[in-house]
Image (spheres, rainbow, N blue to C red):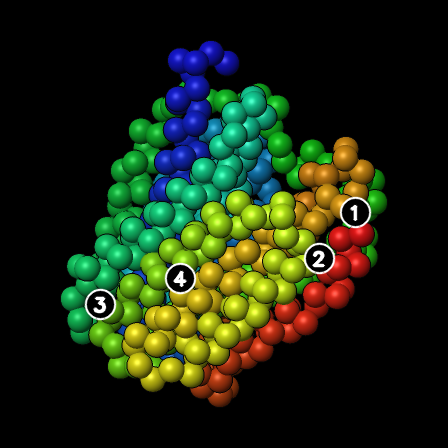
């Protein structure tokens, strides 16, 4: 690949991550309006959110294989489908319609997630570092989209038009993006691992790391999805103010991850996870129990600072439990288990909120983070 070709193939994953972040930033900020417009309670919303995870888990596994065959062009196609699917929740009424809409969103989101990561990995395989930059772009896009919704969100009821607008923008950008030159060289995908290798790398240490990372992701996505609703319902903050909560969380998480990148080699992974989980637990408890908007936002920020470093650190430990040739496969095992926590976290919070209250459900999230912190001694053994 020559220098002239480097820009186009980097453009696909970079813009792809930006669009993906814009969608989920708008989604998190719009969730109170989506819930209100659909006419569902916390339990109904939790049930509907579960279908996002179901849909994503279906497409995450095979979308990478499709991307291997068609190259980087798969990412714009998947993103375009996500933009269209994102329109559906804005027109859904009741738990049934919302569940169907979110199942479609999950299908398209899983495909987009897999294909933009595959596009970035293809570029990295040519010797150009890109994946960390892409994830940074994602976080910035989440913050920008959330703040954009907060700035332009009128109070009161009505249809969540920002989600409609973001979906239209994603489609409009994805169409010309599909014309960017395709890069197929040396794809990196879990689909390339043989059945024998898959069985050999599903070991007890990897399963433990995956379960712990799932807890970390559960805490992370619980706040990313429910922070706006908690701020709106528990503190009587306006929907405009509540829409800023996902941006606060994502911004704090981005700061934490950039800082962790600078100190990771000087601090033991078990220490990073223990401290991060304790910070996340304290922030979660503050945000869950506060009756004042400023204190609640402060808790959300602290939760973001703490939880952001946990899952990546746990996933990185996979390399200690596989031969160098199997590092990718071992990481895939941990990530697959961990992702379950990411997709079911918001749904479990909603279901618990329906059975009790949202405040109690989020206190349980704080307890989960504290439980993760208590696993420090176990992690110390897994480092060896």
How far apart in space, not on screen, are marks 2 and 4 (Cα)?
24 Å
Q: Disc 4 vs disc 1: Cβ atoms closer than 8 Å?
A: no
How crowded is the residue under tag 1: few (<14 C-alpha within 10 Å), some, or many (20+)?
Answer: some
Residue ID for mark 4: 249
Q: For the point 51% across and 37% down, which residue is it?
A: 131
How crowded is the residue under tag 2: few (<14 C-alpha within 10 Å), some, or many (20+)?
Answer: many
Say the numbered circle drawn on residue 321.
Answer: 1
How crowded is the residue under tag 4: few (<14 C-alpha within 10 Å), some, or many (20+)?
Answer: many
Query: Could you tell me which secondary element the residue under label 2 belongs to?
Result: helix
Q: Disc 1 vs disc 2: Cβ atoms closer than 8 Å?
A: yes
How far apart in space, not on screen, are marks 3 and 2 (Cα)?
39 Å
Say the numbered circle drawn on residue 209.
Answer: 2
Q: How many numbered discs sit on the rendered protein?
A: 4
Q: For the point 28% across and 65% down, which residue is it?
A: 243
Residue 298, relative to residue 177: is it above or below? Answer: below
Query: Could you tell me which secondary element the residue under label 3 belongs to?
Result: helix
Between disc 1 and disc 3, whose residue precedes?
3
Residue lying at the far bottom in this picture: please name it: 356
Residue ID for mark 3: 240
Query: Could you tell me which secondary element the residue under label 4 belongs to?
Result: helix
- Residue 270 drawn at (x, y percent): 68, 59
Name the residue nearer the viewer: 168 or 127.
127
Quarter of the figure with residue 64: top right
Query: Could you tell me which secondary element the residue under label 1 belongs to?
Result: helix
> Is residue 326 at all visible to an observer of this figure?
yes
How crowded is the residue under tag 3: few (<14 C-alpha within 10 Å), some, or many (20+)?
Answer: many
Between disc 4 and disc 1, whose residue precedes?
4
Q: Disc 2 vs disc 4: Cβ atoms closer than 8 Å?
A: no
Q: For the point 73% across and 43% down, which residue is it?
A: 319
Between disc 2 and disc 4, whose residue precedes?
2
Between disc 3 and disc 2, whose residue precedes?
2
């Amino acid at each position: 690949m020559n220098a002239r070709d480097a820009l186009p193939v980097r453009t696909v994953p970079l813009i792809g991550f930006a669009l993906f972040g814009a969608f989920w930033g708008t989604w998190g900020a719009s969730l109170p309006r989506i819930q209100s417009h659909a006419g569902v309670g916390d339990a109904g919303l939790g049930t509907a959110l579960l279908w996002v995870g179901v849909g994503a888990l279906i497409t995450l596994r095979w979308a990478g294989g499709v991307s291997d065959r068609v190259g980087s062009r798969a990412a714009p196609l998947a993103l375009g489908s996500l933009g269209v699917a994102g329109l559906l929740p804005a027109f859904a009424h009741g738990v049934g319609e919302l569940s169907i809409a979110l199942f479609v969103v999950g299908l398209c989101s899983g495909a987009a997630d897999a294909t933009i990561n595959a596009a970035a990995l293809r570029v990295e395989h040519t010797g150009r570092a890109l994946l960390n930059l892409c994830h940074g772009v994602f976080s910035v896009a989440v913050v920008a989209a959330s703040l954009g919704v907060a700035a332009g969100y009128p109070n009161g009821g009505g249809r969540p038009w920002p989600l409609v607008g973001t979906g239209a923008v994603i489609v409009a950008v994805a169409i010309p993006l599909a014309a960017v030159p395709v890069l197929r060289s040396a794809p990196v995908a879990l689909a390339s691992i043989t059945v024998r290798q898959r069985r050999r790398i599903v070991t007890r240490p990897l399963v433990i790391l995956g379960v712990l990372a799932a807890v970390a992701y559960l805490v992370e996505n619980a706040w990313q999805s429910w922070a706006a609703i908690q701020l709106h319902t528990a503190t009587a903050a306006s929907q405009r103010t509540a829409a800023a909560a996902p941006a606060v969380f994502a911004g704090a998480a981005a700061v934490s991850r950039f800082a962790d990148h600078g100190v990771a080699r000087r601090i033991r992974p078990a220490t990073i996870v223990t401290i991060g989980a304790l910070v996340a637990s304290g922030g979660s408890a503050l945000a869950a129990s506060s009756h004042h908007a400023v204190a609640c936002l402060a808790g959300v920020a602290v939760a973001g600072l703490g939880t952001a470093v946990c899952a990546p650190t746990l996933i990185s430990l996979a390399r200690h439990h596989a031969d160098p040739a199997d590092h990718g496969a071992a990481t895939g095992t941990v990530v697959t288990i961990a992702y379950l926590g990411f997709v079911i976290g918001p749904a479990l919070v909603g279901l618990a909120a329906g059975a009790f209250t949202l405040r109690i459900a989020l206190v349980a999230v704080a307890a989960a983070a504290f439980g993760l912190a208590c696993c420090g001694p176990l992690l110390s053994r897994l480092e060896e």
